[in-house]
Amino acid sequence: MMIEELQHLLFSRDESASKDDFEDDIVNFNILHKPTEKSRQLTYRHLVDLYALDKQVLLFQVLRKWWEKHEESQPILALQLAVARDPLLRASAEIVLQLEPGEHLARATMEAFLAKDDPERFSAASLKSFAQNINGTWTQAAYLSGKAKKYREIPEVSYVNVAYALFLSHCHGLSGQRLFDSFWCRMLAQDKERLFELAHRASLRGMINFKQASEIVEVTFPGLEMPRINMSEDK
């Protein structure tokens, strides 16, 4: 997930930074301290694949707008955007989220999951590498713990993560209570009462407008130009 690189990159620039600015910083000025020009270019391309680094891309624009509101939220916030953009990482959520706290996740389990639909798609070496990278990504966001062996953890999420989950849910055409039943909120592994509590905190800070009256729930996003075309929810 390259969270340290992303944190350093965003710390060095304000919200007005363009994609070209980030490319200059990484490739020409080497602010991420990579040893070769090739490694700098690869780092830039990988960060673009995961996060876009483009303020014209709404998902990145909102992440950047909320990035500095709560520093401890940043690893999960980065994961949320990466999951939204990377189909393979998004698919892996099915394996991670179904685990009980403390349950072991073997690398072979992730490898088998990645290969189940098309066993010939990846070589054995590629499967091992993808599984290690995916498990490492979930570990960086505190959904897993351990080095050689991975175990399921319940991460500490914040109002920023809940606001971003609601934003992603809205982008997939959901509203009202369905926002809180979405994949993006389920991904946070919190009960609905906790999600409502954190949504209220986000509302108090002006990130969202959250209203709840019995079973009626309304969430809007002040100051954001939301997409006009709704997408069906990714499962």
Image (cartoon, grey):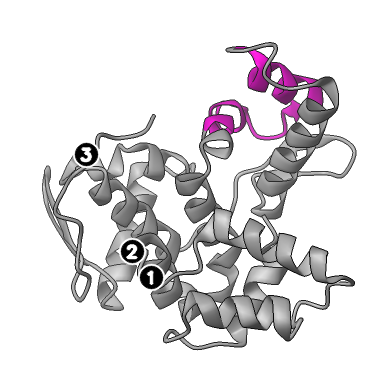
The circle on residue 178 is 3
Q: Secondary structure at mark 3?
A: helix
Asked if the residue at tag 1 contacts the one at tag 2, i.e. Cβ–Cβ closer than 8 Å, the answer is yes
Per the model, the C-alpha gap separating discs 1 and 3 is 24 Å
Q: Is residue 166 above or below residue 10?
A: above
What type is the residue that disc 3 sits on? Arg
Where is residue 11 drawn, in percent x and y?
Answer: 60, 84
Residue 89 horizontal/vertical position (percent): 58, 38
Q: Can you say which quadrant of the picture contains the N terminus? A: bottom right
**Spatial CA span between label 2 and label 3:** 21 Å
Q: Tell me which corner region of the image, top left, top right, bottom left or bottom right, holds residue 154.
A: top right
Q: Which of pointers 2 and 3 indicates the residue nearer the eye?
A: 2
Out of 228 and 181, give the one closest to the viewer: 228
Say whether residue 148 is magenta. no
**Mark toward the start of the polypeptide (1 vs 3):** 1
Category of crowding for the residue at label 1, using alpha-carbon neighbours closer than 10 angstroms: few (below 14), some (14–19), many (at least 20): some
Residue behind mark 1? 61
Residue picked out by circle 2: 58
Amino acid marked by disc 2: Leu
Residue range of the region highlighted in magenta in the rendering? 91-116
